[in-house]
Amino acid sequence: MSLAENFEKIQQQIRAACDRRERGPDSITLLAVTKSQPPEVVRAAAECGQILFGENKVQEAKAKIPLSPGRLRWHFIGHLQSNKCRDAVELFEMIQSVDSLSLAQEISSRAGQAAKTMPILLEVNVAGEASKFGYPPEKLLAELETINQLPRIEIHGLMAVPPWSDDPEGSRPHFRRLCELKTQCEQKLGAPLPHLSMGMSGDFEVAIEEGATLVRIGSALFGPRPTAGLRPSAD
């Protein structure tokens, strides 16, 4: 199928998942994951009506964003190294993958230098996988208030990548756990957190059923990632 057909199919799936939970489809934001996709593919997605895009690598984003339509919005969704925080703060309107107090402190410092406040999501390692980044839930709750007090940080919610499964239902308990953790964070902060970023190409309908507000979709929209093309230096 074409990109336009994929885009419409995903919109239909989002609407169907929302209907199953009596949610309005406008409660879901589709984030198009453009890792390894060239600027012309970004432009084609924008022509379909897609506005929000996500990048995993700062160096790739530095090369790609200036060649993409200026009206687009960009989130950083990959593992962020401290030495890339300055560029990330300049390039992105949100950093979804904050996984430590030290990283949050560096982002706050760089945001202060840029005279801006940085919206963030806190990444949670919901299954305790050794191979993945993200806060252990208990540590997140312990450090949450300290992060919230940083002067140039705004916590907007939580993000997670559950263990891979070929069955979308395998992700459901992890999505449910993240939703429960968001409620705990809201109680601790005494304020609502608007976003749950969870669900990807294989399981985003289940994520929506469990409370996602942001779904991060790459291959279901663009097809398999290209093996050549834009190849920046390592992040």
Image (cartoon, rainbow, N blue to C red):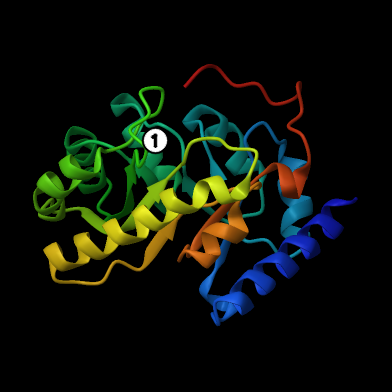
Q: Quadrant of residue 22?
A: bottom right
Residue closest to the eye, 235 or 212: 212
**What amino acid is labelled 1 in the image?**
Asp
Q: Residue at x 46, y 41 (%)?
A: 161
Q: Is residue 126 above or below residue 3?
A: above
Q: Quadrant of residue 148?
A: bottom left
Q: Residue at x 59, y 32 (%)?
A: 63
Residue 96 drawn at (x, y percent): 39, 47
Q: Is residue 16 above or below residue 84?
A: below
Q: Residue at x 32, y 36 (%)?
A: 134
Does the image show residue 95?
no
Does the image show residue 140?
yes
Residue 189 drawn at (x, y percent): 14, 64
Residue closest to the eye, 191 or 56: 191
In this rendering, position of residue 223 left or right of residue 155: right
In this rendering, position of residue 37 left or right of residue 29: right
Residue closest to the eye, 229 or 7: 7
Label 1 environment density (alpha carbons within 10 Å; few <14, some 14–19, many ≥20): some
In this rendering, position of residue 146 left or right of residue 218: left
Assign a secondary structure to mark 1. Answer: helix
- Residue at the disc numbered 1: 87
Residue 130 drawn at (x, y percent): 35, 23
Q: Is residue 2 above or below residue 180?
A: above
Q: Residue at x 62, y 35 (%)?
A: 35
Instruction: State the residue lying farthest toward the top.
Output: 233
